[in-house]
Amino acid sequence: MLRPQHHWKKTSEQKANKLFRTLKRIATLLSKQKGMLALVLLMVVFSSFLSLFGPYFIGKIIDEHIVVKKQDGLIQSLMILGGVYLFLSLSLFLQNYWMIAIAQKTVYSLRKQLFEKFHKLPIRFFEERQHGELMSRITNDIENVSQTLNSSIIQLFSSTLTLVGAVIVMVSLSPLLTVLTLTIVPMMFFGMKWITNRTRMLFKEQQRNLGELNGFIEESISGQKIIKMFSQERQTISEFQRKNEKLKQSGFWAQTYSGFIPKLMNVLNNISFAIIAGIGGVLALKGLISIGVIVIFAEYSRQFTRPLNDLANQFNMLLSAMAGAERVFEIIDMEEEEDEKEAVHLRNIKGEVEFHHVSFSYEKSRETIQDIHFRVSPGETVALVGPTGAGKTTIINLLSRFYDPDSGQVFIDGYDIKHIKRASLRQHMAFVLQDTFLFQGTIRENIRYSRLDASDKDVEEAAKLANAHSFIMKLPNGYDTVLNEEGSGISQGQKQLLAIARAILANPSILILDEATSSIDTVTELKIQEALQRLMKGRTSFVIAHRLNTIRNADQIIVLHEGRIVEKGTHHSLLKAKGFYYELYHAGTDQFNISRGR
Ligand SMILES: Nc1ncnc2c1ncn2[C@@H]1O[C@H](COP(=O)(O)OP(=O)(O)OP(=O)(O)O)[C@@H](O)[C@H]1O
């Protein structure tokens, strides 16, 4: 029995420590705007004082003017009272205004830090995580922090000040009535606890159901084509209805229970008012307190329930925002993909590539590639061939340093690429992948993405070499046609021509090409082939080849199987050897299937 208890104690301690560290970090961020923060706190103190002083002053006016029917000085007192409430409003406005400015500035820099960090993290980081989840850190989590900074800090501080101040004044006026008034506090505490326990669970459920529904909506929007292809509309709608119904149910109960909170507050307010009026009245009749004191108490007790309620709410909000902030800091603290201190910048390269006994695994439990060893002379074309999962993409990932080898080395022009700056290394490479990623923007901007300083003439020149110019000119706005992220409006083959144009513009020494497996119409296919021939000329090219033509023309074919090189050679020498390549070729695997007929 001791152990779990000890464990529990430890984890809750760790949690508290973590929370404290996160709070401290937020405080450090906020302290960058010390001057403004000091002003806000000053305003909070001022407004708390005025909100206590107002009712006190009303009590005084009642005792000194109303009860004794003395008109002298009443007007002045009322003017002072007006001034108190005017300044109270002003200070509340100012503290809010300044605090929002501080909060927005803080989350602005947090958002900036996080986005910049994303670009310094290795590819592994993104491959291991859900993109939706990462998106939510930069949107929801940061928004949560922003909301809390906007209001919670002020509320927590002013609620505490008001509570403490009210109790001090009340005790000084009538300890007995204070004790009686405070009897509602435990009632309030337990009542609130009962409701919030239930609402918290219900809200959690509502949130979960909402998340589920949102996920389902997102999936059915992006999978619309598949839904229609398989005529699953009706099934999708009924699944949606089921989820929608669940959300409605949980939403109904969550809102109903949370709707009790103001009602309960009202009842408790009335009870405390009855206590103050009744018992205060008896005390006043006995001459123990004045009528003004009853008014002060009545007003304070009304003020009492609000800060107590606020404190509980704000504290919950603060906890949830801190959880969000923790998730943000977790990423900000992650180890970055850094270049070695002495890493060099390569100006020009010839394009000689050597893999020297390279082994690598994505996960410790399973070796992905083993003892890969080959050399490529500048300008050569290498076809990487092998069944699915053989390790072709992994070799490309290592060459471009998206991952680093566990053992062995990769050399470019005799330099171990570990000692070359990543940006410099990738500057000498261009990628034409199966799935061309296009950004929202014009065709011109999309081609220029590989060399931002290229002139319009350079862009068009590259498009011409890539056989893309003629189809671009047929688009409604030519080079200024706007594409969305999915590149809808142009075909798969045309997307590839754009990718080739991009690569031609980059003018790299090393070219990485992942040939498309999807079949493309013959005319476009021929255009692609011709453009690729131009692109590959004079550059060291690595091709994950799917077209027989490419494979046949390669200077070197590297045949991979289960992470190892099983054969090397040219098409003819490998066929002659009657080994694994020969088998692949005759078995008509994916790699050879596509273009055998062409
Ligand atoms: N990010 C990753 N994390 C873990 N394992 C991975 C990762 N990427 C690939 N693998 C695994 O590594 C092995 C080699 O994958 P790789 O993508 O290099 O094969 P491939 O030859 O390019 O296959 P294909 O022709 O299907 O693209 C596979 O077993 C794959 O499951």
Image: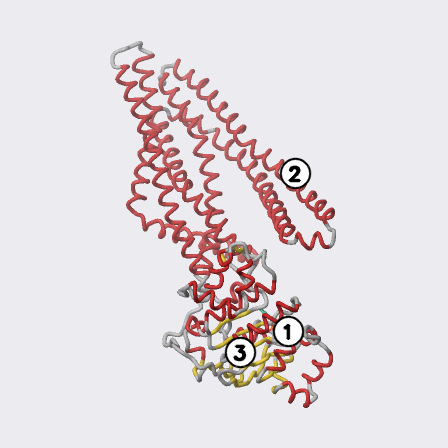
Foreground tag (1 vs 2) = 1
Between residues 50 and 535, which one lies in front from this camera angle? Answer: 535
SS type, badge 1? loop
> In the picture shown, does residue 453 fall above or below 418?
above
Question: First in sequence: mark 3 or mark 1?
Answer: 1
Q: Quadrant of the C terminus?
A: bottom right
Image coordinates of residue 434 in percent, x first then y, are 59, 68
Horizontal side of 561 relative to 103 (left or right) equals: right
Foreground tag (2 vs 3) = 3
Q: For mark 2, does the 10 Å Cα neighbourhood hold few (<14), some (14 to 19), or many (20 or more) residues?
A: some
Residue 389 placement: quadrant? bottom right
Residue at left offset 61%, top offset 50%: 218
Residue 249 marker: 2
Image coordinates of residue 290 in percent, x first then y, are 35, 17
Q: For mark 3, does the 10 Å Cα neighbourhood hold few (<14), some (14 to 19), or many (20 or more) residues?
A: many
Question: First in sequence: mark 1 or mark 2?
Answer: 2
Residue at left offset 51%, top offset 72%: 403
Question: Outermost residue, top direction?
Answer: 69
Horizontal side of 32 relative to 508 (left or right) equals: left
> In the picture shown, does residue 270 fall above or below 117?
above
Image coordinates of residue 32 in percent, x first then y, are 32, 51
* Alpha-carbon span between mark 3 and mark 1: 21 Å
Question: First in sequence: mark 2 or mark 3?
Answer: 2
Instruction: Please name the residue that numbered disc 1 is placed on.
Output: 389
Q: Is mark 1 within 8 Å of ligand 1?
A: yes
Q: For mark 1, does the 10 Å Cα neighbourhood hold few (<14), some (14 to 19), or many (20 or more) residues?
A: few
Image quadrant of ligand 1? bottom right
Instruction: Please name the residue that numbered disc 3 is placed on.
Output: 541
* Alpha-carbon span between mark 1 and mark 2: 47 Å
